[in-house]
Image (cartoon, helix red, strand yellow):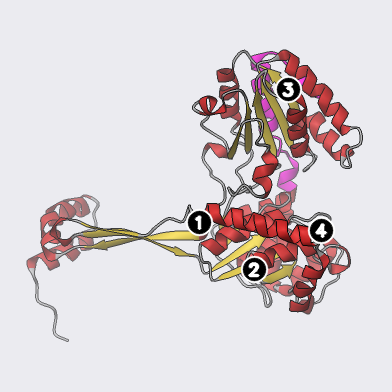
Amino acid sequence: MLRIITQWAEARTELRRICDRTHDDQVVHKEATVREVLQAVKRQGDRAVLDYTLEFDHQDLKPEDLRVSGSELDAAYQQVSKELLTSIQFAKEQIEAFHRQRVPKSWVHFGEDEVVLGKRYTPVDRAGLYIPGGQACYPSTVLMNAVPARVAQVPRIVMVTPPGKDKTINAAVLVAAQEAGVTEIYRVGGAQAIAALAYGTETIPKVDVITGPGNIYVTLAKKLVYGTVGIDSLAGPSEVLIIADETANPAFVAADMLAQAEHDAMAAAILLTTDAALARKVVDEVERQLIDHPRRILTEKAIAHYGVVAIVESLEAAADLSNDFAPEHLELEVDDPWSLLQNIRHAGAIFLGSSTPEAVGDYLAGPNHTLPTSGSARYASPLGVETFLKHSSLVQYSQTALEKVAKAIDHLATAEGLPSHANSVRLRVRGNPKPDA
């Protein structure tokens, strides 16, 4: 099932194929559908949202059904176990503690001649969180999106998630939202949910930034509304790349590969190892652990299409392949992970050592699990507090300071053919009297 590759060139080609797995001809057709949805919601508001929810999610909602009621939010606490509630609260505390360390500070610098320069950070007014749902539930994704927004002090946080059977929203998702400080929740998913957040409807407010992962329709919708609103990233199928040496435990490595593959039929699980014996043992372990796997069919499909084991000549060679792939999740299951870390340039999240499975980061280590995918870790970063903040530059010049730089500004403005730019400085420097009121 898992292929073992021994040639460097073949390994590089295979990794590039996997990285490009979302770029297919069907995307063009899907984008046309998404454009239609966006325009309909922009023009018709709630009516289009409800129509598409019926068409795509087979849920017949009325306008008053869109917002999750207070009684539903209260009832959710009665539907989760005490153990799950405690785990949600613990995860929330861990995530919050990490993100509080990452809040950028506004600053002001007082220079010579009373020149004042600075940077001022302020949160967006409204954030929209998209949480996948329907047949699955992701309370961890709620926490990873809502907690940074709350730490950034966003005044209004709006959450959307597709309804499941009988129009219900998973109780754990509702509890996680409330624990993270979100109380405004709407039962809508897909491209129509992104459209509602981007343009606003009679019921769902327009937001300033949209975060959260979703299927290809959600991702395309986020791509198309970018500019009208800000977005966190364009999330693709999940992926893990593991670099392992002879000290790695094959059962651990196999479990970590399957933990990624069970997400989605397009999820990728890659092992780069210097040890041929480990490679063979991992292949055997994957097959053994799949025997009674509850999500076997889906997981097997992912492994068959986007799973690979490559034997490389050195850990440095493995790092080179990894940097070229720029994985969402990178595990360093080697004897000295901190030494190998010096060779790593591109990865969304890096897990060091055999006692650090990627699942730790998925749920409660603290760093965000909303990460760049499909090679975008070459230039993008995980979701964080910064996603919900923007900064303004602060500039103040005294008369003395302005006079010192006036000639330079004059030359630059004249060179650019902008006479009023130059004149705005000349008038102040010459001390021209103000016109009579």
Separation of residues labelled 3 and 4 (CA atoms): 33 Å
Relative to residue 103, is residue 66 drawn left or right? Answer: right
Residue furthest right as drawn: 292
Residue furthest bottom as drawn: 437
Question: Does label 1 or label 2 sit earlier along the sequence?
Answer: 1
> Eyeballing the image, is 291 above or below 211?
above
SS state under label 1: helix
* Residue 346 placement (x, y as % from top left): 54, 34
Question: Does label 3 or label 4 sit earlier along the sequence?
Answer: 4
Q: Rate crowding at label 2 as few (under 14), some (14 to 19) or many (20 or more) other CA atoms within 10 Å.
A: many
Q: Give the number of the mark in front: 4 or 1.
A: 1
Q: Give the number of the mark in front: 1 or 2.
A: 1
Question: Does label 3 or label 2 sit earlier along the sequence?
Answer: 2
> Eyeballing the image, is 114 above or below 249?
below
Evaluate if marks 3 and 4 touch, with contact meaning CB atoms under 8 Å apart. Answer: no
Separation of residues labelled 3 and 2 (CA atoms): 42 Å
Separation of residues labelled 4 and 2 (CA atoms): 19 Å
Q: Write the start and end of the magenta stretch as one range.
A: 1-29
* Residue 286 placement (x, y as % from top left): 82, 28
Question: Does label 1 or label 3 sit earlier along the sequence?
Answer: 1
Separation of residues labelled 1 and 2 (CA atoms): 18 Å
Q: Which residue is mark 1?
A: 100
Residue 400 found in image quarter: bottom left
> Eyeballing the image, is 312 above or below 269?
above
* Residue 121 placement (x, y as % from top left): 41, 61
Q: Which residue is mark 4?
A: 134
Question: Does label 4 or label 2 sit earlier along the sequence?
Answer: 4
Q: Which residue is mark 3?
A: 309
Q: Give the number of the mark in front: 1 or 3.
A: 1
Q: Residue at x 12, y 65 (%)?
A: 399
